[in-house]
Amino acid sequence: MDIKTILCVDDEINVLRALKRLLRKEPIRLLTANSGAEALEIMEHNEVHLVMSDYRMPGMTGTELLSEVSTRFPDTVQVVLSGFADAASIVDAINQGHIFRFLAKPWNDEELKANLKSCLEQHELIVRNRHLTEELAQRNAELKSLSDRQQRLIEERTRSLQMAQEIVQCIPMPIVGVNCDGLIALANVEADRLLNFPVGTEITRVFPIGLAEAVQRTLDDPNNGREVSKAEFDFEPYIAMVVPLRQGLENRGSLVLLESCPCVV
């Protein structure tokens, strides 16, 4: 553990001298001040882990000093060392959160040292909790930033998909998407008008056998490339182009484009 700094504040020089004698062999750095104003000045130039102040001091009481310390140096543990006559007032300050502990005068040397050790351990907890809170806040901020980016990406992809669907619907020729299971997964307005089938229908119930077999070949082996097939719907001849759909090495189905061809017999 790093050497901790304790600041003792008391307007009585003899009290400060007694505390110096008591704590001189302890693994701490001890600073002293004769007033609240002097204590705050010292804390502006030193990292203080624990302030132990008398309650009754001229100019600024101990609880007023520690209230100021709580605001300006929130990691510093605040302790009052005073007589029992001040206990009622000090309890109010403790309840308000300005003071961590009340130690009585006159003190028992061993009890005082044990209490100061406990207070310094409390400082360790305060600092550790603050670091954890800051780390958690940073992680939450990073997660929020990532979530925001993901949300924007999803929205952009959704808009792109909607635009693609609108474009497909506007193309003036029948277009049919077939999934890897050989089921109709997509059809534009022209395909609905021509074929009149619900999404999820098997291709063998929609396409003539030759076209259905051509689609099945692209589903079985998309590396075969595009196939062109003739088909007839409502006694009208069409040229069908079957395009395998792939994403990398993954087979995503097939796209069937039907072009009316009255010259075909």
Image: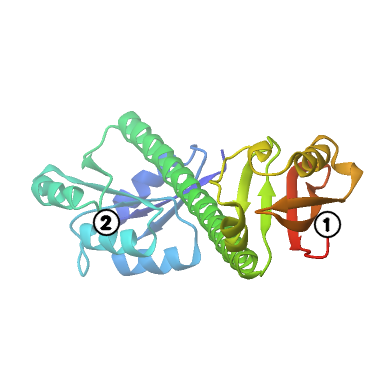
**Which marked residue is nearer to the observer: mark 2 or mark 1?**
1
Q: Which residue is mark 2?
A: 12
Nearest the camera: 120 or 11?
120
- Residue 7: which numbered mark, if any? none
* Residue count near mark 2 (Cα–Cα under 10 Å), binned few <14, some 14–19, many ≥20: few
- As drawn, the residue found furthest toward the top would be 110
Please, what secondary structure does the residue beneath circle 2 have? loop
Q: Nearer the viewer, residue 80 or 158?
A: 158
Question: Can the viewer see residue 149?
Answer: no
Residue at 82% in and 42% down: 214
User: Where does residue 253 sit, x and y in percent of width and height?
Assistant: 73, 44
- Do the residues under discs 2 and 1 have CB atoms within 8 angstroms? no
The three-letter code of the residue at mark 1 reads Val
Residue ID for mark 1? 265
Instruction: Describe the colour scheme in one phrase.
Output: rainbow
Instruction: Give SS at disc 1.
Output: loop
Give x and y (percent) for residue 16.
34, 51
In which quadrant of the rendered view does residue 175 lie? Answer: bottom right
Q: Quadrant of residue 219?
A: top right
CA–CA distance in space, label 2 to label 1: 117 Å
Which residue shows up at 78% across the image and 37% down it? 216
Amino acid type, label 2: Glu
Horizontal placement of 216 versus 195: left or right?
right
Asked whether residue 164 appears in the rendered view, the answer is yes
Q: Nearer the viewer, residue 106 or 68?
A: 68
* Number of numbered labels in the structure image: 2
51, 59: nearer the viewer? 51
